[in-house]
Amino acid sequence: MKKYYKLLKFEFEMKKKLLFVCLGNICRSPAAEAVCLHKIYEQGLQDYYEVDSAGTGSWHVGNKADSRMRAAALRRGIEIKSLARQISLHDFYEFDFILTMDKDNLSTVESLSSKAGQQKIANIQPLLKFARKTNIIEVPDPYYGGEKGFEDVLDLLDDAIDGLLASPEIIC
Ligand code: 4NP
């Protein structure tokens, strides 16, 4: 696997830019960003990727991730450091992949993308398309639920991001 990354680096000298998107950018997408960064560092791939997250909504802009989500991630040795921001049209030019958590995020992102014009480069995909251990197609919003919801989110993200980082679609 590493040799493909080496080819990518030496032939193109470009990083793949991944943006994870949910509604509030305080639970699912900041967790996805942190899980992805954790795996990138574990696999020594930090020269090949840039990772960020954003929300379709603006209510929590500037806030830390939800304390329940941060605590659940920390129990797995993963620190969520990001502050919430809202997705912007610029993101469609800036990122190679925009990975959405649920159908609502996907449809909001797709309709925003149509306003970004012809120069856009982002490839928009539901993140769980890359999951290998489940047929679930949406990462459920844990915000109004109990602690288990946050653990379930992390399990889904763990699986999907393993699949994402191994996917020829992302590597090539
Ligand atoms: P997220 O969860 O989209 O995973 O960040 C949510 C956080 C806050 C709200 C909704 C979803 N909210 O309505 O404030």
Image (spheres, rainbow, N blue to C red):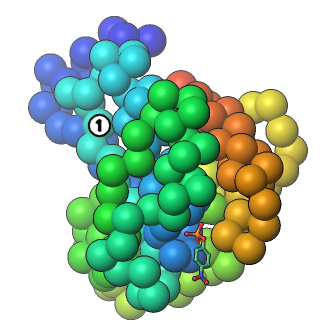
Between 165 and 118, the one nearer to me in the picture: 165
Q: Residue at x 57, y 33 (%)?
A: 75
Disc 1 crowd, CA 10 A, few/some/many (<14, 14-19, 20+): some
Please state the horizontal and vertical placement of residue 142, each as a whole percent of the image.
71, 64
Between 125 and 51, the one nearer to me in the picture: 51
Q: Residue at x 33, y 50 (%)?
A: 81
Q: Is residue 170 visible?
A: no
Q: Quadrant of the C terminus?
A: top left
Pointer 1 residue Cβ closer than 8 Å to ligand 1: no
Q: Residue at x 78, y 67 (%)?
A: 145
Q: Is residue 24 visible?
A: yes
Q: How many marks?
A: 1
Q: Is residue 64 above or below residue 170?
A: below
**Location of ligand 1 given as a quarter of the image:** bottom right
Please state the horizontal and vertical placement of residue 121, each as a whole percent of the image.
33, 63
- The part of the image, by quadrant, that contains residue 82 is bottom left
Q: Residue at x 60, y 44 (%)?
A: 72
Horizontally, residue 125 falls left or right of residue 137, namely left
Please state the horizontal and vertical placement of residue 77, each as a whole percent of the image.
48, 28
Horizontally, residue 49 falls left or right of residue 23, namely left
Please state the horizontal and vertical placement of residue 76, each as a whole percent of the image.
56, 30
Q: Is residue 156 above or below residue 6?
A: below
Q: On the image, numbered disc 1 is attached to which residue?
A: 49
Q: Is residue 71 above or below residue 48?
A: below
Disc 1 residue type? Answer: Tyr
Between 122 and 67, the one nearer to me in the picture: 67
Q: Secondary structure at mark 1?
A: strand
Between 76 and 24, the one nearer to me in the picture: 76
Q: Quadrant of the N terminus?
A: top left
